[in-house]
C-alpha cells in the first residue's frame, strides 16, 4: 500500500511549527518523519493578530520546500466561533442547514461573511450532537492567499484547541466518567471545555482572559465565567456530583485556583502544557482521522484548486511519459531504418559482387550445353538408322526412312510375311533408343510408323 505524508501546521507567536507524519497500512501505523519550526519571523518588530497572515505569508515562502504532503493548518481558537449543539436530526443536509441557522443567532457577523463547518460528537436519543466552528472569510482568505503565494495549497483548516484536546485524550488526561472541566491557560487567551463522560458538551474561548504577566490572577476571572457556565450546564444536562478539573498552563501555575475550587467544589489538578507533544503534532494526528468527518473550515475553492493542481501535475507527467515513449519509439524506428538500410546496402554490394561471376557462369553453362548438343551423337541420324536396321527382322524391306530431329524417325516398309511387320514394330517399341512409337499402321504387306527420340527439353 502506498504511503502518504500528512503535515500539520500552526503559527505560534512569530514561528511556524509543523509536524509531518507518514501514514502506511494498519500494521505499519504512523511514523513522524519531521518535527520542525521556522526561524524567527522576518518582521519581529511587528506584533498583533492583524499581522498573523503577513507573518504566515513570509514564513510559508521561506519554508515552502520543506512542507510535504497534504497541509492542515490550525487557526487559534480565539479566531473561531465554537459551539456544541444538539440537533434533532441525523441527516447531513439537514444538519448543515440547522447549523447555519443556529450560528446566525449567536455570531456577531452575518453568516455569508463566515466559513462554517461541523463534526459529529455522538448520537443522542433525538438526533446528534455536533461541534460547530465558524471563522471570518476575510481571515481565512488571507491564509489561503499566503499559501497560494508560496505555491502551496492548504488542504484543511482546523482549530488549535481541538488539537490540544486530541492530545489530552490520547494521554488519558480526560476521565471517562463524571463531568470534567478543562481550563487551558494559553499565552494569548484562555480556553474552557467541559466534558460529560468524556463527551464534549461545551467549548469556549475566553479571548479577554490571557494568562501570564498581564493577568496573574486569570483563574479568578475564569471562575466567575465558570460559575455561570456550570449553572447553565446543570439546567441543560442535569446535576453531576462527580466533577474533576484540570488547569493546563505554561511555565509557573497561574494563581487563583482557590476560586475554581470554590465554584466547582473539587480539587484543581495542574498540568504543564510542555508535557504534551507540540501542538502541530496534535494537528497532524487529527488530520490523519480526516475521513471521520472532522472540522474543516477551509472553503471548497481551496480543494478545487488542489484538485486542479493535482490534475495539472498528472497531465504534465502523463504528457512527459507519452512524449518520452514517443521519442524512444521514434529513435528506435530510425535506428531500425538505419540498420535495415545498412543491411540493404550490404546486400546490394554482395549482389553487385556476384552479378559478374553469375553472368560468366551462365555463359559457360550455355556454351557447355551447346557443345554437348554438338558432341552428343546418341540421337543422331546415323544412330537412329543403325537402331532401325538392327531391330528390322529378315524379310522386311524399307521403302522410306526419314530423320527429323524434332519428331524422330519415320519408317515405311513392306514384307510378304505379315508377322515380320509385327516383329519390327515390337522391336522399335522395345528399343532403348526410342522413347515411343506412334502412328503405327499395317496394311496388308505394308507398314508405317514413327519412332520418337528425346527432345532437348526431355534431355
Image (cartoon, rainbow, N blue to C red):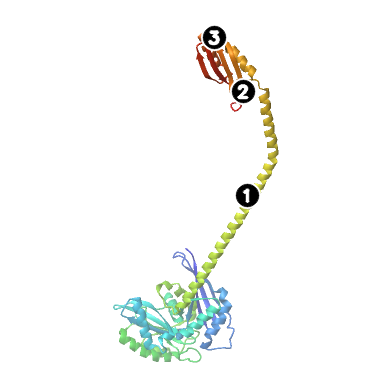
| Callout 3 crowding tier (Cα within 10 Å): few <14, some 14–19, many ≥20 | some
What residue is rendered at 49% in x and 72% in y?
A: 308
Residue beneath disc 3: 415
Q: Nearer the viewer, mark 3 or mark 1?
A: 3
- Expressed as whole percent of the image width and height from the top left, the position of residue 94 reads 34, 79
Residue beneath disc 2: 405
Q: From mark 3 to mark 1, how far is it between C-alphas?
A: 78 Å
Q: Are marks 3 and 1 in contact (CB under 8 Å)?
A: no
Q: Secondary structure at mark 3?
A: loop
| Callout 1 crowding tier (Cα within 10 Å): few <14, some 14–19, many ≥20 | few
Q: From mark 1 to mark 2, how far is it between C-alphas?
A: 53 Å
Q: Are marks 1 and 2 in contact (CB under 8 Å)?
A: no
Q: Nearer the viewer, mark 3 or mark 2?
A: 3
In the image, residue 371 sits, relative to residue 56, either above or below, namely above
What residue is rendered at 52% in x and 7% in y?
A: 417
Q: Which mark is residue 340?
A: 1
Ranked by sequence position, the earlier of labels 3 and 2 is: 2
Ranked by sequence position, the earlier of labels 1 and 2 is: 1
- Expressed as whole percent of the image width and height from the top left, the position of residue 172 reads 41, 76
Residue sitting nearer the eye, 308 or 451 = 451
What residue is rendered at 52% in x and 84% in y?
A: 53
Left or right of residue 354, residue 414 in this image: left
Amino acid at each position: 500500500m502506498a504511503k502518504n505524508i500528512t503535515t500539520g501546521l500552526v503559527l505560534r507567536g512569530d514561528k511556524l511549527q509543523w509536524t509531518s507524519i507518514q501514514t502506511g497500512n494498519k500494521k505499519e501505523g504512523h511514523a513522524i518523519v519531521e518535527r520542525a519550526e521556522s526561524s524567527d519571523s522576518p518582521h519581529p518588530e511587528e506584533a498583533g493578530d492583524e499581522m498573523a497572515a503577513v507573518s504566515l505569508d513570509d514564513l510559508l515562502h521561506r519554508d515552502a520546500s520543506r512542507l510535504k504532503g497534504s497541509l492542515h493548518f490550525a487557526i487559534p481558537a480565539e479566531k473561531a466561533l465554537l459551539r456544541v449543539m444538539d440537533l434533532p436530526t441525523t441527516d447531513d443536509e439537514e444538519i448543515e442547514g440547522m447549523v447555519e441557522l443556529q450560528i446566525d443567532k449567536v455570531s456577531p457577523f452575518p453568516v455569508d461573511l463566515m466559513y462554517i463547518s461541523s463534526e459529529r460528537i455522538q448520537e443522542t436519543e433525538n438526533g446528534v450532537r455536533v461541534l460547530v466552528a465558524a471563522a471570518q472569510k476575510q481571515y481565512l482568505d488571507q491564509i489561503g492567499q499566503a499559501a497560494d503565494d508560496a505555491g502551496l495549497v492548504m488542504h484543511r483548516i482546523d482549530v488549535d484547541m481541538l488539537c490540544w484536546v486530541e492530545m489530552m485524550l490520547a494521554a488519558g488526561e480526560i476521565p471517562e466518567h463524571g463531568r470534567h472541566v478543562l481550563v487551558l491557560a494559553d499565552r494569548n487567551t484562555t480556553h474552557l471545555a467541559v466534558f460529560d463522560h468524556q463527551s464534549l458538551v461545551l467549548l469556549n474561548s475566553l479571548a479577554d482572559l490571557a494568562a501570564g504577566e498581564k493577568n496573574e490572577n486569570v483563574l479568578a476571572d475564569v471562575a466567575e465565567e465558570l460559575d455561570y457556565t456550570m449553572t447553565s450546564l446543570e439546567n441543560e444536562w442535569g446535576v453531576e456530583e462527580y466533577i474533576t478539573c484540570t488547569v493546563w498552563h505554561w511555565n509557573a501555575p497561574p494563581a487563583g485556583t482557590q476560586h475554581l475550587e470554590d465554584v466547582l467544589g473539587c480539587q484543581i489538578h495542574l498540568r504543564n502544557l510542555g508535557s504534551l507533544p507540540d501542538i502541530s503534532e496534535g494537528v497532524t494526528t487529527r488530520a490523519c482521522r480526516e475521513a471521520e468527518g472532522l472540522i474543516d473550515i477551509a472553503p471548497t475553492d481551496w480543494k478545487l484548486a488542489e484538485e486542479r493542481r493535482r490534475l495539472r501535475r498528472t497531465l504534465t507527467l502523463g504528457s512527459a511519459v507519452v512524449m518520452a515513449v514517443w521519442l524512444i519509439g521514434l529513435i528506435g524506428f530510425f535506428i531500425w531504418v538505419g540498420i535495415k538500410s545498412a543491411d540493404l546496402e550490404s546486400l546490394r554490394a554482395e549482389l553487385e559482387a556476384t552479378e559478374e561471376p553469375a553472368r560468366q557462369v551462365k555463359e559457360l553453362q550455355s556454351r557447355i550445353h551447346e557443345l554437348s548438343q554438338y558432341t552428343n551423337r546418341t540421337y543422331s541420324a546415323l544412330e537412329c538408322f543403325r537402331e532401325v536396321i538392327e531391330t528390322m527382322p529378315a524379310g522386311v524391306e524399307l521403302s522410306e526412312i526419314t530423320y527429323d530431329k524434332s519428331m524422330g524417325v519415320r519408317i515405311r516398309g513392306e514384307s510378304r510375311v505379315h508377322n515380320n511387320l509385327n516383329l519390327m514394330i515390337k522391336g522399335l517399341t522395345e528399343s532403348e533408343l526410342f522413347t515411343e512409337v506412334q502412328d503405327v499402321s499395317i496394311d496388308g504387306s505394308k507398314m508405317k510408323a514413327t519412332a520418337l527420340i528425346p527432345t532437348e527439353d526431355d534431355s
